[in-house]
Amino acid sequence: MNDGDSTDCFAVGDAEASLSLVSAMRTWLPGMSWSQLRRLIQTRRVTVNHSLCMDEGRRLFVGDTVRLLGESLPPISPDQVRLRHVDEQLIIVYKPPRMLTLRHRAERHFPPRRKAQQPTLDEILPQLLLEREGRRAARGHRRPRLYCVHRIDRDTSGLLVFARDEGTQKALIEKFARHDVGRVYLAIVPGHVAAQTIASNLVRDRGDGLRGSAADAEQGQRAVTHLQPVETLGDYTLLECRLETGRTHQIRIHLAELGHPICGDPVYRAVFGKPPIEDRSGAPRLALHAAKLQLIHPVSGASIDCESPLPEDLSRFVDRLRSASQTA
């Protein structure tokens, strides 16, 4: 389940600012009763700024985005998070899909019970580290502090690195800026895609409010993605996408502009100005997974190479496409 299954998306404007969530929904959906709207919220079918919201009285602000999902958002268990590499300076972790990397600034004051409705990776990791470093925790060792280095989208699964001190954070951020960190994603797209490199300049607004490639080569940030087909799945392709740069939504934008939007992508489904490309795959979510992370340790100089296979939901999705292609 992802935002791609949403039936409605609403942007909070001046008219809805300061209203409660349920009151704003009443203005957007006048055909629904108050009890029906409350039921939608209570059954985990409403998000605010991509985060589950079960508080009907939450006050909204201009710029907030409210989505009504087609199905209930399933609870996320901290047990789904996996530590893949741990040392004194950094950790590499597997983030499950539907989990935010960081808690939104406006939600950091939420009480624990409310945060537990949709836990975020940065809140779960310190406890996992305490459990792993059990002897130190037993002596009352304080809760570990972690420093974000990069993020992946909520609906994307896969590998991320966090620093355990500010010096390591700075060194890792510099490595990312110099493109010294190897990052490989797996994506499932409609159609057949040949090996190629896509290069463009990405801007925050391509003209319709979405990020995209600028027509003017002097605008935006340089973005380069290397594509390599892994397997043909009937009318779909399993692709390996290697980032040379790491811009926001880079792979999603490049593939959509190529004419092959990632299966299950609720946002980048068409090239600006052209009819939407229909995705009939029935993907369980955004079919994108951060599969490999390679870097040189900023302190020890050791080579770190972590891999993560497709998680169960995407693995089943690939199996289904493969089986359909064999019986067609």
Image: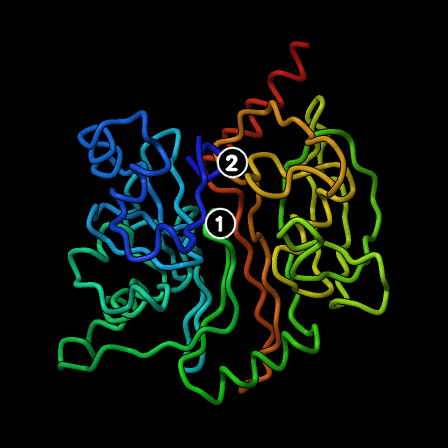
- The three-letter amino acid code for the residue at tag 1 is Ser
In front: 264, or 289? 264
Q: Quadrant of residue 42?
A: top left
- Under tag 1, what secondary structure? strand
On residue 314, the disc is 2
Q: How many residues crowd around disc 2 within 10 Å: few (fewer than 14), some, or many (20 or more)?
A: many
Q: In which quarter of the image is residue 24?
A: top left
First reached walking from the N terminus: tag 2 or tag 1: 1
The answer to whether residue 22 is above or below residue 5 is below
The x and y percentages for residue 228 are: 77, 45
Q: Residue furthest front?
A: 15
In front: 123, or 195? 123
Residue at 13% x, 81% y is 140
Name the residue that disc number 1 marks: 157
Q: Which residue lies furthest to the top in this view?
A: 328
- Under tag 2, what secondary structure? helix
The answer to whether residue 16 is above or below residue 5 is below
The answer to whether residue 116 is above or below residue 104 is above
Q: How many residues crowd around disc 1 within 10 Å: few (fewer than 14), some, or many (20 or more)?
A: many
Residue at 36% x, 61% y is 121
Residue at 55% x, 48% y is 289
Q: In which quarter of the image is residue 34?
A: top left
The answer to whether residue 308 is above or below residue 32 is below
